[in-house]
Image: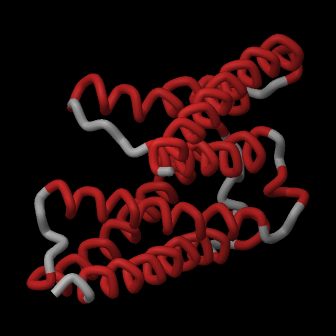
Amino acid sequence: MKIELKKILQVFNSLLYVFFICFMVYMLITSYSTMKLSQILQLLCIFPLIMVPYVLDKIKGYQIDEKLIFFYYLFLLFALVMGSILKVFYQIWWFDLFTHFLSGILTSVFAYIILEKYQLTSYQYRFFALLFILAFTVFVAGCWEYFEFTCDKLFSSDVQWVAKTGVDDTMTDMLIATLGGILSSIYYYIQIRNKK
C-alpha cells in the first residue's frame, strides 16, 4: 500500500512539474507584451522554485518525501500561480489567508524534518521541538513579509496592500501563518509526547 501511494504521488508530482513548466511558457508567450516586469519575474520564479526538491536531493543528498513535495507543489500552485499570477488574491477575499495558513503548516513540517534529521524528536526534547517549530514558522513568515516589502519597493507594487490596509494585511498574514504553525506544533508535540 505504501509503495502504491509513493508511485501515485510521484506521478502527481511529475504532472504538477510539467504543468508548472507549460504554464510558465504559455503565459510568457501569450502575455509577455502586456505584462509588468514584476509579473514576468513571478513567472520566471516558477522554474527555480519547482527545482528545490531536486536540488536538495542532488546537492545535499537529502531526498524529500514524495508527500512533502506534493504539498509543496500544491502550495506553489495556490500561492504563486493562482494567488499572485492569476490574481485570485484580489478576487476571493479569504484566499490570501488560506495560503498563509498553508504556509504555516508547510514550514512547520520543514521544521519537524530538521528536528528529525538531528534526532531531536524524542520525548526528552518535546518542549524544544515545540518552540523550534513555532520559532521557525514565525521566522519564515517574517522573511516572506520582508520579501514582499522588498518587491513593493523595487517594483513600485503593492502586494502587501499597504495603500489599502496599512500594516493590517502584513500582520494578519503573519498571525495566520503562526496559527498554522501553532496547530502543527501541537500535533507534533502530541506525537512526540506519545513516543515515551
Residue projecting furthest to the front: 1
The colour scheme used to paint the residues is: secondary structure
* Left or right of 182 on screen, residue 56: left
Residue projecting furthest to the top: 29
Residue 19, image x, y percentages: 72, 27
Q: Nearer the viewer, residue 123 or 105?
A: 123
* Left or right of 191 on screen, residue 69: right
Image quadrant in which you'd find residue 89: bottom right
* Left or right of 50 on screen, residue 124: left
Q: The C terminus appears in which quarter of the rendering?
A: bottom left
**Image height of 27 relative to 192, above or below:** above
Q: Nearer the viewer, residue 115 or 191?
A: 191
Q: Nearer the viewer, residue 67 or 143?
A: 67
**Residue drawn 36% across and 42% down?**
64
Image quadrant in which you'd find residue 38: top right
**Image height of 63 relative to 142, above or below:** above
**Image height of 18 relative to 170, above or below:** above
**Residue drawn 56% across and 51% down?**
71
Residue 192, image x, y percentages: 25, 81
**Residue drawn 61% across and 23% down?**
44
**Image height of 103 relative to 65, above or below:** below
**Residue drawn 73% across and 31% down?**
39
Residue 74, image x, y percentages: 63, 48
Report the number of numbered marks. 0
